[in-house]
Image: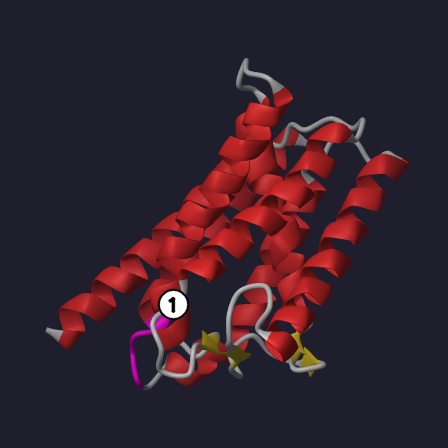
Amino acid sequence: MPDRFYRPVLTILILAYIAGVIGLQLPSLAPLFRSLVPYNLLGSLLLLLLFHPDWKPSFLFYSILAVVLGFLIEVLGVHTGFVFGNYAYGETLGWKLWDVPVVIGCNWLMLTYCCGVIFDTFRVPVYLKTILAASLMVMLDLLIEPAAIRLDFWSWFGAPVPIRNYLGWWIVSLVLLAIWYGLPFRKQNRLAKPLFILQFLFFLLTNLIIFLVQR
């Protein structure tokens, strides 16, 4: 996508995430904004991919693999508890297949893409980039979990979030990111870092508001 579209697209994303932080906390608007969550995720991914510079077959392969593998891992997790622990998805993330929101595979692609781009410029061995990027994924999940439970993304049936969830996130992310770095396509995207920061701030601010309201 031409550079002249970068600022307008970034502005739209910033406004969308700010609106989400506010709208999800207002009782009169929360149902509407919850229904928009899957469209926000899909829209964010679409805008991210519009700025991808290198549509080689290897990138298409990774994109399909991340979506499909991420989704199937979640199906395995929901039905067996083997990967992340015992959890179930709520209604906020939209239409489900095999009790897993279809959009969740897109989320795996978007987050691994962003984390992979962020660390690609680091002058360290590829294995270290992979470890750092997977660890950043887990840091984000630490913020996601409290907000996700409150917003009915998913539920741990009233139990604390198990440590195995974060370990599972790290392992799955590590596998996907190892493939990401191993495939021969360009890994630059000027929207990736701002989008990840917006995700980070969205969950940070949402958790802060939830904490203040519950006091």
At horizontal 65% and vertical 39% (from top left) the residue drawn is 177
Where is residue 3 drawn, in percent x and y? 63, 30
Q: Quadrant of the N terminus?
A: top right
Q: Which residue is mark 1?
A: 161
Q: Is residue 16 visible?
A: no
In the depicted structure, whether residue 129 falls above or below residue 194: above
Instruction: Specify whether residue 153 is in view.
Output: yes
**Magenta stretch: dominant secondary structure:** loop
Q: Which of the pair 2/185 is nearer the observer?
A: 185
**Is residue 62 located in the magenta-colored stretch of the structure?**
no
- Who's the residue at 76% across and 48% down the image? 63
Query: In the rendered image, which quarter is residue 94 located in?
Result: bottom right
- In the image, residue 153 above or below residue 141: below
Circle 1: element type:
loop
Horizontal and vertical percent position of residue 194: 47, 39
Quadrant housing the C terminus: bottom left
Residue at 16% x, 76% y is 214
188 w.r.t. 6: above or below: above
**Region in magenta:** 23-27
Q: Give the image location of residue 103, x and y in percent.
A: 65, 67
**Amino acid carrying mark 1 in the image:** Val
Q: Residue furthest right?
A: 57
Image position of 111 (left or right of 103): left
Q: Is residue 24 magenta?
A: yes
